[in-house]
Image: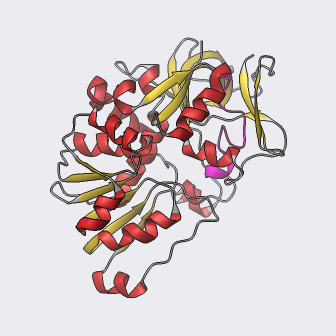
Amino acid sequence: MKAVVFDGKNLSLKYDENYPMPTILKDDDVIVKVEYSGVCGTDLHIIQGEFPASKERPLPLGHEFSGVVHQVGKASIFKVGQKVVVDPNRACNLCNFCRDGKYQYCLTAGINSTIGIWKDGGWAQYCRCPQDQVYALPDGITTEQAGLCEPYSCVSHGFDRIAPLPVGNKILIVGAGIIGNLWITTLHLQGHRDVTVSEMNKARLDIVKLLDTGYRLITPDVLAAEKQLYDVIIDCTGVGKVMEISFNYLRHGGKYVLFGCCPPTHQASLNPFQIYDKELTIIGVKINPFSFPKALGLLRAMGSRYLNYEKLGVKTYPLSGYQDALKELKAGTISKAIFKIV
């Protein structure tokens, strides 16, 4: 089968037309015929050697994907032909974290066993998944829309971490890549209107305009010059230095949400007195524990008003076009690349 394969030992990618087809190994396995598979910022960090991933053997990356059921084990609840989406993360169900419903902290599962990072993922025509990580798509949600379900599940978890987030709060989103855009659509759907978006790449701000939210769009130099303060700052950049700068824009009682995934080497210097004096809260958001049902609810509520690839800055590519996808993504001319696999 066709796949884009990552070799963790030498940090290389290649397009392979003869990667081995997955087979049913366990009675509850599901083989998904992939239709849409996203390229995540974490994938870029992995390719650059900045984020841990499997080095045991070359494998397809891709932890954000949707498709249809191709084959099932004899104990599976799924049927061939069903439209599905895959949650790449799962609990080990044995450690105290998992048994407390917090598998994002699990030291053996969670992000440490992710499909598409540690196991064969969705940058391929087919992918084998345990059935407890597969979700049937409700009526009205297309596999194209569901290609965004995994990142929306992370946003959903972030919403839970921030709560309460009253309508009327003054909110700043830093970074208008795809994650920033998903936060923009989620906040707008929930009724938030006092939202400012800061992004240094003006091409990305032009993409945000297509979403027609009426949000204030500015560049970081304007943000620094005007010295406004915010109740909530959602950092979608994944850059430690950005946190160091943006943290100063919080009001008393404010919340700083570190959502973008920084490489482990990044550092940021903060003023502890400021945290004390303003009673500030720093919130980390790690993966998507038990938030896929909420993400599917978001997708149903959003529909075509928000889930339009062109308005979100999403561009599709064949697997063979992976080099163009990565090039345009790094250049910032698009907010997200998704492989459309036929």
Q: Is residue 114 magenta?
A: yes
Q: Residue furthest left?
A: 168
Q: Nearer the viewer, residue 260 or 21?
A: 260
Give me the residue at 56% from left, 54% from top.
Answer: 103
Q: Nearer the viewer, residue 292 or 36?
A: 36
Q: Magenta span covers which residues?
A: 110-126
Q: Is residue 336 magenta?
A: no
Give me the residue at 53% from left, 39% from top.
Answer: 331
The number of numbered badges drawn on the structure is 0
Give me the residue at 39% from left, 61% from top.
Answer: 257
Identify the image quadrant of the N terminus. top right
Q: Position of residue 240 (x, y in %)?
A: 52, 65
Report which quarter residue 297 is drawn in: top left
Q: Position of residue 113 (x, y in %)?
A: 68, 47
Q: Nearer the viewer, residue 313 or 99?
A: 313
Q: Position of residue 293 (x, y in %)?
A: 41, 37
Q: Is residue 251 left or right of residue 271?
A: left
Give me the residue at 72% from left, 43% from top.
Answer: 118
